[in-house]
Image (spheres, rainbow, N blue to C red):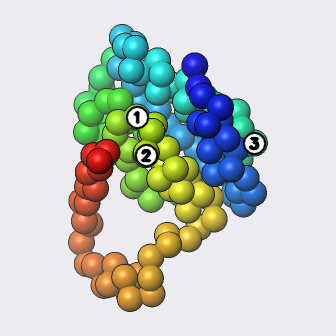
Amino acid sequence: MLTDQQRLAIEDGLRGLTHPVTLLYYTPDVASAATLLERALLEEIARCSDRVRLQVLADRWDSAREGAVGIARTPAIVVKGERDHGIRYYGSPDGYELETFLAVVRAISDGHSGLAEGSRAMVARLSAPLHLEALVAPT
C-alpha cells in the first residue's frame, strides 16, 4: 500500500533513533478506508525501527479512558517516549505531514524539542497547563 518514496522517507526519518518511542493509535472500532491506510503507514513506521513500538487501540469510544490520556476524538496518535509529553496527532501523517510526523518521533526519541533557548525559557515560565493545537493544511 505504501509507495517507495514513503518507505524511503520513513527509513531516513527513523535512522539512528536513540531512545524508544511508543505510538498509541486510537482508532474507531469500525475501520474505514482512511483508517486502514493510516494503520498500514503506522505499522510500516514501527517495522522500520526497533526503537518504535505501535500499540493499536481499536475499541469502542470510552470517554473516561480517552479523557484520561487527553484524546478528544479518533483517530488519534499518541507519541510518547519514557514519559508522555502530551503530543496528540489527529489525522493521517501522510503526504506532506509524513516528514513532520517523523521529526516529532525523532524529537521524542532524542529528547530534544528543537525549540530555541528563548522559547524554552518562555515555556518554563508557564504556571498552568497550556492546550496548543497546530493545524496544518497542504498548500
Residue at 27% across, 33% down: 73
Q: Relative to 100, does residue 122 appear above or below in the rendering?
A: below
CB contact under 8 Å: marks 2 and 1: yes
Q: Is residue 138 left or right of residue 36?
A: left
What quarter of the picture does the N terminus occupy? Answer: top right
What is the distance, in whole Å, between disc 2 and disc 3 at their CAs?
A: 22 Å
Q: Nearer the viewer, mark 2 or mark 1?
A: 2
Task: Using a 10 Å C-alpha cutoff, classify the residue at mark 2 as few (fewer than 14 neighbours), some (14 to 19) or many (20 or more).
Answer: some
Label 1, on which residue?
A: 92
Residue 69 percent across, percent down from the top left? 37, 44
Most extreme residue toward the front is: 139
Toward which corner of the image does residue 119 lie, by quadrant? Answer: bottom left
The answer to whether marks 2 and 3 mark residues whose Cβ atoms lie closer than 8 Å is no
Alpha carbons under labels 2 and 1: distance apart: 8 Å
Kind of residue indicated by mark 2: Glu
Which of disc 1 and disc 3 is earlier in sequence? 3
Residue 87, given in percent of the width and then of the height, sits at: 41, 53
